[in-house]
Image (tube, coloured by chain):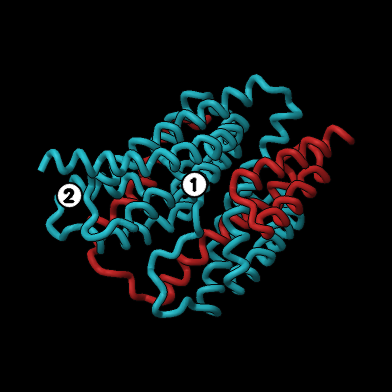
Amino acid sequence: MNNPYIYILIMAAVSFLIRVLPLTLIRRPVRNRFIRSFLYYVPYVTLSVMTVPAMIEATGSPLAGGLALLCGVFAAWKGAKLLPVALICCAVALLTQLIL
Amino acid sequence: MRKENTSIFIQGLRDGVPIGLGYLAVAFSLGITAKNSGLNAFQGFLASLFTIASAGEYAAFRVIATRGGYLMMALMILVANCRYLLMSCALAQRVSPGMRFIHRFGIGAFITDEIFAVSIARPGYLKPAYTYGAAAASVLPWAAGTALGVIAGNILPDIVVSALSVAIYGMFLAIIIPPAKKDRVVLGIIPVSFALSAGLRYAFPGLNENIRVMGLTVLISVCAALLFPVKEQEEPAEAPEGEVCRE
């Protein structure tokens, strides 16, 4: 059984190093085009693969999760901000489960 | 000098208040994830206080939920938070060359999408007092929100908790979808990532979730970087706008 406090310590330590090392060691801009491109795409890819299929599986019902996903994508596309999109997803998931 | 620092700190504090309000809501839904991974409110509070990263913490909580190893935890945080490397590089260009190491550590420790955004927008050399002010107003709500989410997850009915658990994904969507309207490569990357992630999940149900997320992130990002390198003149610290909301 892994200790939650050791997990938290690792989370904190690695995050701290990522944030602090460039600021203390690297004093010049990152010029390498491949590295810059890679770092540019990483957030989008990682958030995408963390969202699907986890969102579909998050509630007891794949239908509720799937509908929440579709409505969330639509709302975000239409320009809804972070909090409204999140609330719309929750509402869709809740209603679907209540109706089923 | 001290008086000047105080007034800069207060400016940071003022800019940090709206950030903190937004954090409270996001952290609340993150707290539901923390609760589902088996953490208690105090552990959720500590994790958020010291990690201060929504996607990073979400990934970390999934590692805990799936009982991943400690090395897996370190790698996952590295991948999910690696954009902070870039932000740190960008801030390194904006601080006084003679700035003491303690303040370089201090500024770095509080890099989040929002604190970075307000800090980098300051004219001239960045004063550490400003970043400390913004962090003072926003990091505690972030940690408190996570603890509240864990508590709410424990007392609300199951059907509500399961509905709330999609909130964090809704926030992820709100981060990745708007840039996709402006950048055609991002527009293509999102459905490809969705499809590969879901495809792998169902083709190999036994495949470890953390390895799937990490492997696909590196693979797809490397392919995208090779096929569609970003333009030369772009700013090095190009992050998705507002990972945590700023309302």
Q: B37 above or below B214?
A: above
State which chain disc 2 sits on.
Answer: B
Instruction: Report the residue marked by disc 2.
Output: B101
Q: The cyan chain is which one?
A: B
**Whether marks 2 and 1 lie on the same chain:** yes
The quadrant the C terminus of chain A occupies is top right
Residue B54 position within the rendered picture, expressed as x and y whole percent measured from the top left: 50, 44
Residue at 75% of width from left, 47% of height from top?
A68
Residue B177 x %, y %:
62, 60
Chain A, hue in figure: red
Q: Whole-percent x and y of residue A67? A: 79, 48
Task: Kindly identify the amino acid type of the residue bearing the numbered disc 2.
Answer: Phe
The residue at the point 64 percent across, 52 percent down is A80
Instruction: In this rendered view, identify the residue nearer to me: A31 or B212.
Output: A31
Q: Tag on residue B132?
A: none
Residue at the spot of label 1: B246
